[in-house]
């Protein structure tokens, strides 16, 4: 791996030695004894990383004898490079191999600083604790600095981009023979606190040497970037400062601030409230960029996406998200064809074909028997239909033949099942109207004539990334047809009057409906899709291995696993709906409009059946009378012809 530096460059030589270090640093023997005792007591089975810093290339750097510094330990020597070359090669692969080969769960970095300049802390940070795949973990492992004096110790421990970002750090000053650490958030502020004299190595309690100062931040102010996510968090500007107003993440912040004693400075994330977008040149925008560049200590509601994990770190998931699409509910209508809807078209065809086959079979049976009367097909048809509607036929079929008996018996069973199923479905289909088809899966949406709307903040965010990078033909189809809606409310309003599927996160859909479209009973004119996709976790982000992440994650995990986060979210939505309903009642009262609550109260219980429910029945009734009228006219005409014929015969022969 190659990097470019200016002429005043520090060379980092990575050495994996095959034998232990045997020369002495020249410091008091108590320092060597203390380090050996420290390693023996607490880090005997940990990875030891030894760093020696000497900016004067003419001075030979020697180190003390460390009995527990194994031959496989990682050793880093930093010297001033006189060459003006700009390209330096770092053997980072070998540095990573140390942990991979030894499989050790802890590490101690022993850093000997002979000379200190302004660039040294930053170089130490880039080599030891880079953002991705660090040699040593700044929030879990321990750092021991051996400095010439307290001034250098304070400078290295308080350096904003190195010492202050290390959780467990300890400084040893040989001249003072003392152990020093910085209480960053305690009563002493940013001052060195002397622990004990190194000449007394027998008392080496871990909690005393490496205290955890992240339980109480003593009012420290965290800068928090807030993307545009009103469904989870809203803030308002008041008295020259942004304050949280409502939302699930507002409650989370309140709990964290109360538990860990810190304050917050809220501001809208860059990219006009974006979550995170990476440009083609690798530059990040949005809340991810705010955390990455150090403008924010944390950011609210960021989705766990693969291309972000090398740059920032997520908290334990606070919420879980999945994408759905929202459409208007199926439009209902009443139709006279309701009387045919209990059975599908194929069943109706099968029913009449069964009648035709039975009539033909019985006709053939009677025709083949010479000792029985030949019954007409019309009589057989009348008998079958009469049995189907549970009516007695005028003329019974001669059933002395076993063949006829068996056929009629199975026909009665067949007609009983069909008629029972028909009548069982008929009541519900008459009472409830027919409805139009709406897509319920993403495949349905992709192959329908519905428009496709996607709620994203411009060309960025997790939803856009999912659709734009997917290899699925379904999502590629949706991506080509999609219309971007930065405001989900606009998309849903279009969906009230047009056939459009609005793709958005489930929490966005719930929030938008509760805030703008639900009635007093929580009913919405929209329905979510049955299918979901792109399940992701959301939470806070902060820099890689932030020193406060462990305690924040532990408390967050307890909140989520206990179900409190879900309760907080829907409690907030109910409060939001109540606020809107109160506003609507106030507006209606001022304009003398009837209250929606009283309108619903007038019709409690199930609704009554109306004339339109029986449109098919009355249509059938009218059709029957028309048929009867036609028969009457035909019979009248036929009777008239018969009378005329008889009258003519009478005249001719009488």
Image (cartoon, helix red, strand yellow):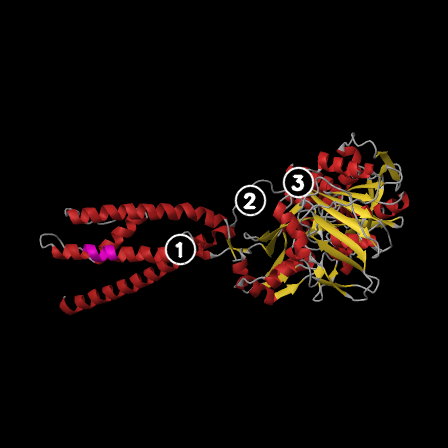
Query: Mark 2 highlights which residue?
Result: 607
452 is higher (above) or lower (below) than 560: below
Q: Residue furthest front?
A: 23
Task: Tell me the SS state at disc 1.
Answer: loop
- Image quarter (top left, top right, bottom left or bottom right) of the C terminus: bottom left
Residue 560's disc number: 3
Q: Residue furthest bottom?
A: 652
Which residue occupies 86% across, 37% down?
178
Q: Position of residue 145 (x, y in %)?
A: 81, 44
Q: Position of residue 567 (x, y in %)?
A: 67, 39
Which residue occupies 76% across, 47% down?
583
First in sequence, mark 3 or 1: give its number.
Answer: 1
Real-space Cα separation, disc 1 to disc 2, in angstroms = 27 Å
Q: Residues within 10 Å of mark 3 (few under 14, many from 20)?
A: some
Q: Residues within 10 Å of mark 1 (few under 14, many from 20)?
A: few
453 is higher (above) or lower (below) than 422: below
Task: Tell me the SS state at disc 2.
Answer: loop
- Marks 3, 1: nearer the viewer: 3
Real-space Cα separation, disc 3 to disc 2, in angstroms = 42 Å
Residue 344's disc number: 1
Q: Give the magenta range.
A: 357-362
Tag 3 near tag 2, CB within 8 Å: no
Q: Nearer the viewer, residue 492 or 629?
A: 492
First in sequence, mark 3 or 2: give its number.
Answer: 3
Q: Is residue 194 visible?
A: yes
First in sequence, mark 1 or 2: give its number.
Answer: 1
- Locate residue 362 relative to residue 223 in the image: left or right: left
Q: Residues within 10 Å of mark 2 (few under 14, many from 20)?
A: few
């Amino acid at each position: 791996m190659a990097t470019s530096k200016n002429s005043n460059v520090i060379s980092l030589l990575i050495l994996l030695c095959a034998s232990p270090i045997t020369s002495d640093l020249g410091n008091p023997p108590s320092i060597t004894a203390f380090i050996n005792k420290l390693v023996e007591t607490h880090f005997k089975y940990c990875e030891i990383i030894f760093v020696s810093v000497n900016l004067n290339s003419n001075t030979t750097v020697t180190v003390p004898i460390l009995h527990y510094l194994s031959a496989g330990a990682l050793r880093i020597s930093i010297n001033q490079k006189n060459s003006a070359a700009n390209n330096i090669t770092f053997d980072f692969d070998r540095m990573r191999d140390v942990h991979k080969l030894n499989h050790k769960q802890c590490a101690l970095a022993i850093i000997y600083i002979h000379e200190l300049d302004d660039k040294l802390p930053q170089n130490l940070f880039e080599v030891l604790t880079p953002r991705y795949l660090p040699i040593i973990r700044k929030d879990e492992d321990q750092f021991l600095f051996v400095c010439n004096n307290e001034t250098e110790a304070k400078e290295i421990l308080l350096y904003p981009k190195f010492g202050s970002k290390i959780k467990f750090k300890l400084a040893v000053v040989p001249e003072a023979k003392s152990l020093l650490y910085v209480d960053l958030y305690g009563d002493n502020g940013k001052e060195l606190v002397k622990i004990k004299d190194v000449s007394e190595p027998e008392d080496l309690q871990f909690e005393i040497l490496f205290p955890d100062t992240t339980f109480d931040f003593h009012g420290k102010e965290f800068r928090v970037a807030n993307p545009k996510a009103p469904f989870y968090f809203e803030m308002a500007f008041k008295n020259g400062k942004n304050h949280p107003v409502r939302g699930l993440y507002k409650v989370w912040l309140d709990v964290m601030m109360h538990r860990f004693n810190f304050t917050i400075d809220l501001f809208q994330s860059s990219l006009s409230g974006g979550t995170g977008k990476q440009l083609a040149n690798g530059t990040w925008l949005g809340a991810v960029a705010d955390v990455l560049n150090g403008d924010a200590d944390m950011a609210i509601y960021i989705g766990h996406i693969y291309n972000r994990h090398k740059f920032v770190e997520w908290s334990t998931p606070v919420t879980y998200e999945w994408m759905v699409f929202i459409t208007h509910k199926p439009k209902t209508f009443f139709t006279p064809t309701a009387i045919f809807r209990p059975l599908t078209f194929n069943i109706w065809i099968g029913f009449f074909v069964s009648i035709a086959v039975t009539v033909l079979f019985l006709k053939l049976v009677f025709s083949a028997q010479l000792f029985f009367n030949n019954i007409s097909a019309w009589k057989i048809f009348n008998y079958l239909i009469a049995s189907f509607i549970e009516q007695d036929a005028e003329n019974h079929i001669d059933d002395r033949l076993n063949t006829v008996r068996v056929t009629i018996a199975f026909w009665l069973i067949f007609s009983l099942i069909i008629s029972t199923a028909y009548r069982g479905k008929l009541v519900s289909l008459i009472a409830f109207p027919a409805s139009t088809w709406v897509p319920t899966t993403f495949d349905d949406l992709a192959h329908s004539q519905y428009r496709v709307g996607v709620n994203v903040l411009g060309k960025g965010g997790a939803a856009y990334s999912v659709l734009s990078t997917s290899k699925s033909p379904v999502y590629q189809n949706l991506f080509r047809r999609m219309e971007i809606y930065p405001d989900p409310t606009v998309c849903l309003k279009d969906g009230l009057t047009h056939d459009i599927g609005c793709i958005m996160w489930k929490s966005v859909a719930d929030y938008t409906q509760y805030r703008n479209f639900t009635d007093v009973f929580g009913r919405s004119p929209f329905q979510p899709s049955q299918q979901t996709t792109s399940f992701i976790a959301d939470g806070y982000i902060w820099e890689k291995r932030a020193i406060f992440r462990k305690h924040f994650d532990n408390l967050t995990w307890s909140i989520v696993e206990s179900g409190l986060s879900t309760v907080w979210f829907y409690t907030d939505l109910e409060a939001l709906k109540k606020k809107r309903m109160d506003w609507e009642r106030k507006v209606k009262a001022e304009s003398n409009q009837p209250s929606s609550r009283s309108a619903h109260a007038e019709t409690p219980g199930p609704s009554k059946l109306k004339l339109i429910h029986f449109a098919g029945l009355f249509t059938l009734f009218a059709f029957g009378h028309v048929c009867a009228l036609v028969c009457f006219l035909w019979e009248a005409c036929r009777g008239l012809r018969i009378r005329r014929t008889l009258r003519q015969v009478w005249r001719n022969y009488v």
